[in-house]
Image (spheres, helix red, strand yellow):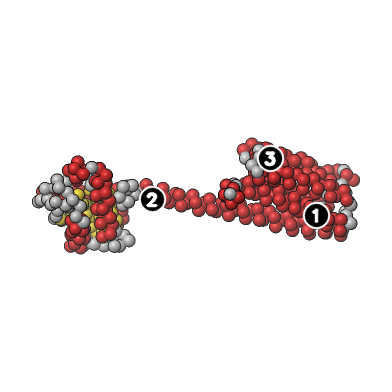
Amino acid sequence: MRNNQVKRISVSERIFLNYMAFFAIISLVTVPINLLYQLPFHLNYKWIAIALLCAIAGSLAYRGVHTKRVHLVTVTAMTFVVIPGAWFSSAGLQSPSVIYSVAVMLLINFTLTGWLRWFFNGALTVVTALLIAATFIIPNSFTRLSVEQQFFDWVTHVSIMLTFMALQLITFAKAYEKAQHRNQQQTEKLAQLAHTDPLTGVNNRLNLMSDIMQAKNSGEAFALIIMDVDHFKAFNDSYGHLEGDQCLKTVASILMSAVKRSGDRVYRFGGEEFIALLTRTQSTDAEEFAEHVRLQIEQAAIPHSKSSVADVVTASFGVASCTPASKHSPEALIELADKALYAAKAKGRNRIHRAG
């Protein structure tokens, strides 16, 4: 159950929890270190307060109790209480207090949205600017540290904070990259669906014209084959649309299995008509391809008692070839193949006719 709960935590919420856990732990660890180095005890007040605030906020956020309010209250406390308190109790610019302003600004942008994000970014900037000004205007209001104390304070806290912020940014960057990858996969899938016939899984006619033009521009011979399932309306009327859909799926599968080269394409042209675009193909090879598909469809032995051609499903084919010297447009080639298909039907169906 706990694993499922963790999976539902958003990236921004995960980062907020990391912040709370880190600040709570680092605050509690800092207190004994300060005592060890015999720093004034009042310097620990801010760390104790930060640890309590982060522990309470982290616990509420983890349990999902008023999450947005917890974010808002925590950021408000950090901006208007913790940051000023840290400056005045840690010697101002003598200590690395400014890096905590940077850390809180990251927290603001990770957890808040809309106008609240803009407001607190501006508020934190103003608060930090005023605190910097205060170190020059009223320097006696800040604790003074020795050079040794300053060195220890800067080295430890800056190193720790930079490491933590880097880890948070890495977490966010990985989540962003993962989201980008997921979006790219979805975009590619949608693009594929837009160009695919949902019933048969072959290409729809969306890119047919451009693909024909690309084959023509290659400077090599290619062929266009239009195939029509014989008496398909009678098949649908007799066996029902579900069986009709299954018949078309079977025919499309046979066509796709016959296509061997990456440049060749199969399209559902409409209803029971399919088109095969065969690149780098002479007319005789195209006829052989069509004959192979015709036999495969016949041998699939899909019953068709209402056909005047055979007692199984058959198909007729029209073949049109295009040589490098041909001036035919894509539309003209389709018309040639369509006329050849009409001729095949006129001659009795279940046969191939090549455009002259």
Q: Mark 2 points at which residue?
A: 192
Q: Which amino acid does label 2 sit on?
A: Gln
In this orientation, does residue 225 appear? yes
Q: Residue at x 27, y 46 (%)?
A: 245
Q: Residue at x 43, y 51 (%)?
A: 188
Mark 1 surroundings within 10 Å by alpha-carbon count, few (fewer than 14), some (14 through 19), many (20 or more)? some
x and y percentages locating residue 350 in the rendered image: 14, 53
Residue projecting furthest to the front: 1
Locate residue 60 relative to residue 154 in the image: left or right.
left
Circle 3 — which element? Answer: helix
Circle 1 — which element? Answer: helix
x and y percentages locating residue 177 in the rendered image: 55, 53
**Which label's residue is closer to the chain start, 1 or 3?**
1
Q: Which residue is drawn at 13% across and 52% down?
A: 310
For marks 1 and 3, give the CA distance: 25 Å
Q: Quadrant of residue 235?
A: top left
Q: Which amino acid does label 1 sit on?
A: Thr
**Which label's residue is closer to the chain start, 3 or 2?**
3
Q: Residue at x 65, y 53 (%)?
A: 168
Q: Name the residue under label 1.
A: 30
Q: Name the residue under label 3.
A: 70
